[in-house]
Amino acid sequence: MIKNSIGPAALCALLLLGCGLKANPVAPASGAARGGTVQKPSVAAEGGAAVLSWRLSSSDRVSYTIIERSTLGSAGNICRDCPRTFEPIDRLPADNAGEKSREYRFVDSSVGKGKTYSYRLQLCEETGECRESQTVEIDF
């Protein structure tokens, strides 16, 4: 009779000890703590090109920036709620404009008249981990 009660008691003791106390969850590091964040992204038409400009809050851990573009359609025929497909159009090293200014600029000369374009940036670290910026749009 003692043999039969030891097995279930040992099993219950192992289960209770295995649960243990766990620490409170920790929020992941914010973008600012991990590296730079994009401030004031904008796009404007200059001549026959779209000029994208932005500022990084800090480029300490940002190794490079991928610039992506999506074509939304022609003016008057735009589906703003439709899913967007962004394609990379260029890759810039983080020190493109120098550490002091942290201001960046990209000229997209392959835009067509009568279309709407949406741009976003991917800030990437040396590990390959990237974070998306907000999108900006321009009617060309």
Image (cartoon, rainbow, N blue to C red):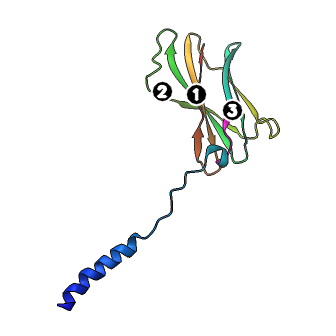
Image spot of residue 124 (x, y percent) = 63, 43
Question: Which of 89 and 22 lies nearest the eye of the viewer?
Answer: 22
Res 73 label: none
Sort mark 3 into few (<14), some (14-19) or many (20+) by Cα contacts within 10 Å: some
Which image quarter: residue 106? top right
Badges 2 and 3: C-beta atoms under 8 Å apart?
no
- Residue at image point 30% right, 76% down: 12
Sort mark 2 into few (<14), some (14-19) or many (20+) by Cα contacts within 10 Å: few
Q: Amino acid at mark 1?
A: Thr
Badges 1 and 2: C-beta atoms under 8 Å apart?
yes
Badges 3 and 1: C-beta atoms under 8 Å apart?
no
**SS at mark 1?**
loop
Q: Is residue 83 above or below residue 73?
A: below
Image spot of residue 115 (x, y percent) = 55, 14
Image spot of residue 57 (x, y percent) = 72, 38
Question: Magenta stretch?
Answer: 34-39
Horizontal side of residue 77 vs 135, given as left or right: left
Q: CA distance from mark 3 to mark 1?
A: 12 Å
Sort mark 1 into few (<14), some (14-19) or many (20+) by Cα contacts within 10 Å: some
Q: Is residue 23 above or below residue 52?
A: below
The residue where tag 1 is placed is: 135
Q: Amino acid at mark 3?
A: Gln
- Residue at image point 61% right, 52% down: 127
The residue where tag 2 is placed is: 84
Q: Earlier in the sequence, mark 3 or mark 1?
A: 3
Image quarter of the C terminus:
top right
- Residue at image point 61% right, 46% down: 30
The residue where tag 3 is placed is: 39
Q: CA distance from mark 1 to mark 2?
A: 11 Å
